[in-house]
């Protein structure tokens, strides 16, 4: 097998992203285990791992990756930095027909670039790679930042000011909840994001309870409940539904979240949602006297969508705002009549080292073998949007998108 040369790209998008596909130790591990691979790292003053951390492990640092066969980044590559006839891995944000990246995909086709989008890497219908776990971890931590600020109970250091996850978790010791008012937490979702959030709740020793117990019992301490789509949606004809049916035909369902909203103090949104699915709670729902939720950590962050209080995304620097259900407008986050909303849309960037290591581990385990086994499971094929100047068969639906139709 001929040598394969991989280049780790310096992120060029503005604002810059500190994450990388692989930590220095992971690059060294790959090189030691796979002599057929060469890996070069483009010099960068913005990534979370400094250049010398790579060079100290005898990993070549280069000013350009133009001599590499495969080029790996994280965020979209600026059009003027794309190199013709290369294979790229990055999150292109094109497969949902995002208008702001139409020109990027056009340029990829013009330059005969093979684009493999991380978001499409899958096996047997399930994604094998992503930053979702750390979105959940940081998002849940930010939920407790928001709760503490709203009620002036405690102050946690922002995750992006922590050195790593270990320091962030040590901060959680500062969380002091009023024993007279047990905190009831609802989570929607069952994927990487939700499981990341639950890692934090489990670390805090907050018990997980079943739906029936969450709704029927008066809890003497704080608890959380994980809700599946069939818990907070119900079939319109009142018959029993299923998760698989909901994903295939969401129009058969109505929302059924209010029974949880009446019992919940803190709502952490970790679900996947697409147009055509029922909203989770609407603006009218939030006006009801039995709507009890006071803090929403919307990790999914669909704007003006299933979570009515999410009016806009927030930033790492200013992560919280308030939502007044009666006027349907933004207010100060600590307005007692409103809902405090955390809706940061780039949460893994707050712990870039940990998020990068987690991402690299998943790539090494689930994707790297495809480079050596002729992609026998179709992992790469599933994610290849463009090749040799053309859309691949799976992504032909993007033809009109490219044309601007």
Image (tube, rainbow, N blue to C red):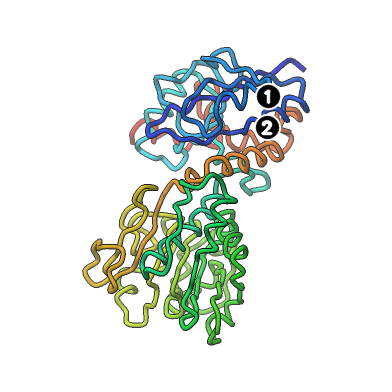
Residue 165 image offset from top left, x and y in percent = 57, 50
Please rate how many residues cluster around mark 1, counting C-alpha atoms within 10 Å: few if below 14, some from 14 to 19, many from 20. Answer: few
* Whether label 1 touches label 2, CB < 8 Å: yes
Tell me the SS state at disc 1.
Answer: loop
Judging depth in this view, the residue of 380 and 312 nearest the camera is 312
Residue 387 image offset from top left, x and y in percent = 55, 24
Residue 1 image offset from top left, x and y in percent = 77, 17
Tell me the SS state at disc 2.
Answer: helix
For disc 1, the marked residue is 57
| Corner quadrant of residue 13 | top left
- Residue at x 64%, y 30% (from the top left corner): 24
Disc 1/disc 2 C-alpha distance (Å): 8 Å
Residue 402 image offset from top left, x and y in percent = 39, 31
Judging depth in this view, the residue of 8 and 167 nearest the camera is 167
- Residue at x 48%, y 56% (from the top left corner): 139
Which callout, 1 or 2, points at the residue further toward the start of the chain?
2
| Corner quadrant of residue 338 | bottom left
For disc 2, the marked residue is 25
Q: Is residue 189 above or below residue 370?
A: below
In the rendered view, does 126 fall on the left or right side of 253? right
- Residue at x 50%, y 31% (from the top left corner): 47
Judging depth in this view, the residue of 113 and 263 nearest the camera is 263
């Amino acid at each position: 097998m001929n040598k394969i040369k991989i280049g780790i790209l310096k992120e060029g998008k503005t604002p810059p992203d500190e994450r990388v596909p692989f930590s220095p130790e992971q690059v060294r591990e790959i090189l030691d285990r796979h002599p057929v691979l060469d890996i070069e790292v483009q010099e960068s003053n913005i990534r979370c791992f400094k250049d010398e951390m790579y060079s100290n492990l005898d990993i070549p640092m280069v000013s350009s990756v133009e001599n590499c066969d495969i080029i790996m980044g994280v965020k979209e590559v600026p059009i003027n930095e794309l190199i013709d006839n290369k294979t790229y891995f990055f999150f292109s944000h094109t497969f949902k027909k995002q208008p702001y990246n139409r020109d990027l995909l056009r340029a990829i086709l013009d330059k005969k670039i093979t684009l493999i989008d991380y978001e499409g890497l899958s096996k047997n219908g399930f994604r094998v790679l992503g930053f979702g776990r750390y979105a959940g971890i940081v998002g849940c931590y930010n939920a407790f930042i928001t709760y503490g600020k709203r009620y002036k109970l405690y102050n946690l250091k922002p995750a992006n000011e922590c050195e790593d996850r270990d320091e962030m978790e040590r901060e959680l010791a500062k969380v002091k909840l009023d024993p007279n008012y047990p905190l009831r937490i609802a989570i929607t979702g069952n994927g990487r994001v939700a499981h990341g959030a639950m890692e934090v709740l489990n670390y805090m020793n907050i018990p997980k309870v079943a739906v029936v117990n969450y709704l029927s019992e008066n809890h003497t301490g704080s608890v959380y409940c994980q809700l599946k789509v069939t818990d907070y949606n119900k079939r319109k004809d009142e018959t029993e539904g299923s998760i698989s049916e909901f994903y295939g035909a969401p129009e058969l369902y109505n929302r059924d979240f209010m029974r949880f909203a009446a019992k919940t103090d803190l709502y952490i949104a970790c679900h996947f949602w697409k147009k055509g699915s029922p909203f989770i709670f609407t603006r009218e729902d939030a006006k009801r006297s039995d709507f009890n939720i006071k803090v929403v950590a919307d990790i999914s962050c669909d704007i003006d969508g299933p979570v009515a209080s999410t009016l806009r995304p927030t930033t790492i620097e200013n992560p919280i705002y308030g939502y007044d259900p009666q006027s349907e407008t933004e207010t100060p986050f600590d307005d007692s009549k409103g809902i405090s909303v955390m809706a940061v849309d780039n949460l893994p960037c707050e712990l870039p080292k940990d998020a990068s290591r987690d991402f690299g581990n998943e790539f090494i385990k689930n994707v790297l073998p495809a480079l050596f086994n002729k992609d026998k499971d179709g992992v790469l094929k599933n994610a290849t949007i463009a090749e040799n100047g053309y859309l691949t068969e799976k992504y032909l639906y993007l033809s009109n998108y490219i044309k601007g139709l």
